[in-house]
Every structure is written in structure tokens, then in C-alpha cells.
């Protein structure tokens, strides 16, 4: 037997995580060719309102140009000012919305031990660690459903997750946390409800849209109850901790920011499919613009079509099995259907924002393909075995 076959499920998962880290590191370097300075990956522009504060705290910080400004600046501000009691929260736009997802910045502030100079390196290590976790846990998730553990390599092949790694954003950790929740949920009552509650709280504070994950698992619980099957009641109660933490934090945020700071940009989310139709309309205008606009106008429809197909197939596969992953994919696909043109039109957002639902949809598809092919699943005596996570119908 070859060494690859002797790896077993956990060995394959480790390889998937390591490959994700390696590919991401190379992508980060390529994105800042010819010389990478980690602070540049935060994409704080020299024209940002917070730039002067950053210069004072870290004289060696490398800024980017105004057109390269991106979301890393918001998490940097949260790391400096975690509870919006200091100066940094007044130096970013749409601050109330930005503080709605505080955990990434909180973790960076915690791990930096209050040293602003260490923040870029901390964000970088967190990103690579999240990519490893995403590759490892996605592999374990697919294997737990009877699919090939090698599907964890999808993390290293995801344009959205790789782009997120070049901007030190949260998508890799989002995927890792959702996979961790699903794997723990699959333990049933054998898994500690307290651990599940902690995982869900972290996930809901990491990104607003992930509040749909505990709701999806509650729907899965309701489905099992209606079918007269066993229900993990301690786990179901633990799921409430996530939304409770999110709404509690949101209430605090509303007390800290003005109405202007709490505003949200129109065009980010709306009625189902309306944003998609507007994106196709705007893409048609860009096709006849300058050469760079033409590139967006001609490629956006194809990229969106491919994204929609993956999400649709993954959702159908999940609905067919009616498992926990399927319910999560369906709700996440529904959210992507509600995205607005600001999120869908430009390639960096088009691939990054749906990257977590797409990865989960691929996992759902991988499990469905393995089961449909009639291949046997791992047994408890095999090295790659992990318990199935509520796939029984």
C-alpha cells in the first residue's frame, strides 16, 4: 500500500490544511510582488482617516494607495479599540456595521498583548492558522459523511478564500468554525453542549451572516422531531447562545454609535435575485466602457453563473439527504441569492463573499456523489473513520 493510502483520514486532513497554508502564503507573496511586507496585507491606505494614528503607533507600517483600501482597516481599528470606547472607532466609515462582526479584531488585539506593532504579524498568523483549520476541518467534515477526505483541498483551490488570505480577512476562519460546529453537532449528546455553545457564540460574533448556522441546525432539529427521531435537546438549547450573544452585542453597538455610523450601504443586500439582475444589467454597461471595465462586464456573468450552479447543486444534494450540512447550505445559498450588486459585480467581492457557502456546497456535493456511487463508507476499524454527523434520514 502506498504512503498516500496509509495516511488515513486525519493524515489526509493534515495534508489538506498544510497545502492550504502553503498555497495561501505563495498567493500573498504574489499579490504584493516583488516584495511582501505583512502590514500591506491589511490594505490600510495612506489616505484613510485612521492612517495618522497608525503612523504614530507603528512608524514602520507600510500603507497602500487609496484605490487599494480594503476591509482589513476595520479589523485593525477594532483590535485597537475593541469596545468602541477609544479613538479608532471614529476613524472608520460605517463603524456601527463594522463593529457588528468584532471577533476577528478582538482576537488580534488579544494575541498582540496590546502591542500595536505586532498587529500585522498577528493578523497574518491568524489567517494562516485559519486556512489550516479550514482545510483540515473541511476534510474531516466530508469524510464524516462518507466522502473522500481529499475534498479538503478545495480550500487551497478556492479563489475567494485565497483572495481573503491576501487581505487578512475572516472567510477562512468562518469556514473552519462552521465545519467545527457541524462536526461537534454530529456527536449528538456525546458532545458537550457547553463546547457547542462556545463554538456558536464565536461563530456568530465572527460574521453577521453566520447567525444563520444555528438557525439551520434548529431547523434540522425540528425536522428530526417531526419525523419522530431522536433529538439532541441539550445541543438545541446550546445553539441559542450564538444568536443571543450576537443580538446582545448588537444592542451594545447601537448605544455606542450615531445614526450615521450605524448606516449600511444600499446595494449590499436586498430581495432575492434582485441584486443578481441588477448586476447583469450593470455588467452590460461596463462591457462598452474602458478596457478594464470591459473585463469586469464580460466576466462577472460567467463567475456568478458558476457560483449559482455550485450552490444550487449543493443545496439540492443537502435537501435530498436532509442532514445538518444540507440545512446550512440551503440557508447560506438563500442568503447569497439576496446579495446586492455592490457585492456581486466586482470580482474580488464576487468570489470572496460567497466563498464559505460555496465550500460548504462542495462538501455537500462530495458527500452526495460518494453515497450515490454506492461506494462503501469507512468502518470504525479503519484509520480515517469518524462518526457520521446525522446523515440518517
Image: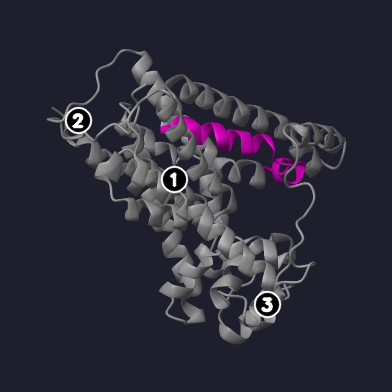
Numbered label attached to residue 5: 2
Instruction: Determine if the magenta segment contains residue 337.
Output: yes
Q: Are marks 3 and 2 in contact (CB under 8 Å)?
A: no
Where residue 26 sits: x, y (%)? 45, 52
Q: Quadrant of residue 139?
A: top left
| Residue that lies at the very extreme toward the bottom in this rendered image | 56
Would you say 132 lies left or right of 3 here? right
Q: Which residue is mark 3?
A: 51
Q: Which residue is mark 1?
A: 178
* Label 1 – label 3 distance at C-alpha: 34 Å
Instruction: Determine if the magenta segment contains residue 254.
Output: no
User: In which quadrant of the rendered image does the C terminus lie?
Assistant: top left
Where residue 141 sits: x, y (%)? 35, 37
SS of the residue under disc 2: helix
Numbered label attached to residue 241: none
Q: What is the crowding at mark 1: few (fewer than 14 residues within 10 Å), some, or many (at least 20)?
A: many
Would you say 275 lies left or right of 28 here? right
- Magenta residues span 324-347
Q: Quadrant of residue 111?
A: bottom left
Where residue 63 sits: x, y (%)? 64, 71
Residue drawn at (68%, 74%), measured in percent from left and top? 256
Residue drawn at (51%, 48%), measured in percent from left and top? 162
Please tell me which of labels 2 and 1 falls first in the chain.
Answer: 2
Please tell me which of labels 3 and 2 falls first in the chain.
Answer: 2
Mark 1 or 3: in front is 1
Amino acid at each position: 500500500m502506498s504512503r498516500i493510502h496509509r495516511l488515513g483520514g486525519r493524515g489526509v486532513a493534515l495534508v489538506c490544511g498544510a497545502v492550504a497554508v502553503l498555497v495561501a502564503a505563495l498567493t500573498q507573496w504574489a499579490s504584493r510582488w516583488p516584495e511582501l511586507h505583512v502590514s500591506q496585507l491589511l490594505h490600510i491606505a495612506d489616505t484613510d482617516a485612521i492612517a495618522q494614528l497608525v503612523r504614530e503607533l507603528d512608524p514602520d507600517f507600510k500603507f497602500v494607495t487609496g484605490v487599494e483600501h480594503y476591509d482589513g482597516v476595520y479589523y485593525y481599528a477594532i483590535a485597537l479599540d475593541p469596545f468602541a470606547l477609544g479613538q479608532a472607532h471614529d476613524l472608520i466609515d460605517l463603524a456601527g456595521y463594522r463593529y457588528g462582526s468584532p471577533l476577528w479584531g478582538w482576537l488580534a488585539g488579544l494575541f498582540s498583548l496590546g502591542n500595536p506593532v505586532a498587529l500585522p504579524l498577528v493578523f497574518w498568523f491568524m489567517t494562516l492558522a485559519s486556512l489550516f483549520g479550514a482545510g483540515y476541518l473541511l476534510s474531516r467534515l466530508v469524510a464524516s459523511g462518507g466522502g473522500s477526505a481529499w475534498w479538503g483541498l478545495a480550500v487551497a483551490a478556492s479563489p475567494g478564500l485565497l483572495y481573503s488570505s491576501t487581505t487578512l480577512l475572516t472567510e477562512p476562519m468562518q469556514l473552519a468554525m462552521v465545519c467545527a460546529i457541524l462536526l461537534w453537532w454530529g456527536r449528538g449528546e456525546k458532545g458537550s453542549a457547553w463546547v457547542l455553545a462556545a463554538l456558536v457564540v464565536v461563530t456568530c460574533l465572527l460574521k453577521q451572516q453566520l447567525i444563520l448556522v444555528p438557525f439551520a441546525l434548529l431547523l434540522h432539529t425540528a425536522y428530526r422531531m417531526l419525523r419522530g427521531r431522536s433529538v439532541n435537546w441539550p445541543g438545541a438549547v446550546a445553539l441559542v447562545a450564538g444568536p443571543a450573544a450576537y443580538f446582545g452585542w448588537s444592542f451594545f453597538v447601537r448605544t455606542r454609535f450615531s445614526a450615521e455610523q450605524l448606516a449600511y450601504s444600499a446595494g449590499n443586500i436586498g430581495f432575492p435575485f434582485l441584486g443578481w439582475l441588477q448586476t447583469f444589467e450593470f455588467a452590460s454597461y461596463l462591457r462598452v466602457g474602458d478596457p478594464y471595465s470591459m473585463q469586469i462586464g464580460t466576466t462577472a456573468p460567467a463567475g456568478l453563473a458558476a457560483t449559482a450552479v455550485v450552490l444550487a447543486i449543493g443545496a439540492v444534494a443537502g435537501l435530498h439527504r436532509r442532514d445538518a450540512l444540507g440545512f446550512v447550505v440551503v440557508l447560506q445559498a438563500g442568503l447569497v441569492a439576496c446579495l446586492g450588486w455592490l457585492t456581486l459585480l466586482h470580482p474580488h467581492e464576487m468570489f470572496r463573499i460567497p466563498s464559505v457557502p460555496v465550500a460548504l456546497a462542495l462538501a455537500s456535493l462530495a458527500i452526495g456523489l460518494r453515497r450515490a456511487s454506492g461506494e462503501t463508507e469507512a468502518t470504525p476499524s479503519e484509520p480515517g473513520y469518524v462518526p457520521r454527523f446525522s446523515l440518517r434520514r
